[in-house]
Image (cartoon, rainbow, N blue to C red):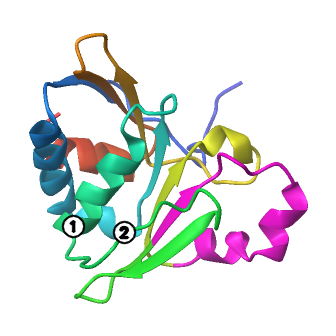
Amino acid sequence: MVDDHLPIVETPKNSGRTLHWRSEHDTGAFARALAASPALRNAFIALHGELGAGKTTFVRHLLRALGIEGRIKSPTYAVVEPHEAPDGLAIFHFDFYRFNDPREWDDAGFRDIFAGPGLKLAEWPENAAGRTPIADLAIKIEAMTDDTRSVTLLANTPRGSDLLAHLGA
């Protein structure tokens, strides 16, 4: 049987890369490079890693690079913190660490947020598995014993591949 149509979502080949962040300066430099990518505007980025790996620190650097000023709170208890960049970009920072009730997804309007425009950043996305769409870019941050970070980037969509291409990955 011949398959005469393309899949709805195609995972690009060679869509991953591993980086090594030696310091928080490297985290900030990566965030600034990512912020400069036009593909970021409506992307969904999933952030994976243990407690203390640096997920929230990365998000803070990215939000600063996008022009967010003032205090940037972790959404651990609120589940989502909305932001608006100076250019009007809507940004939603999710933290699903304490997420355990699928009804909360619908009640909180998360389905509408993910269906709408804007950048979505999600820590602990596995706790909302089956609710979130496929992340354009998955970032796994691992704290190493020497306080550096091993960072694995995986593009899951053409937009994710565009993000990696912009980063030179």
Q: Answer above or below: position of 141 versus 71.
A: above
x and y percentages locating residue 144 in the rendered image: 31, 14
Q: Answer above or below: position of 77 versus 126.
A: below
The answer to whether residue 88 is left or right of residue 136 is: left
Q: Which of marks 2 and 1 is nearer the N terminus?
A: 1
Q: Is 106 contained in the magenta span? A: yes
Q: Give the range drawn in magenta.
A: 92-116
x and y percentages locating residue 93 in the rendered image: 48, 64
Tell me the quarter of the image containing the C terminus. Answer: top left
Q: Do the residues labelled 2 and 1 touch (CB within 8 Å)?
A: yes
Q: Answer above or below: position of 93 versus 87.
A: above
| Circle 2 Cα neighbour tier, 10 Å, few/some/many (<14 / 14–19 / ≥20) | some
Instruction: Give the SS element for disc 1.
Output: helix
Tell me the quarter of the image containing the N terminus. Answer: top right
| Residue at screen point 10% across, 41% down | 25
Q: Mark 1 points at which residue?
A: 64
| Residue at screen point 36% across, 38% down | 54
The residue most toward the top is 145
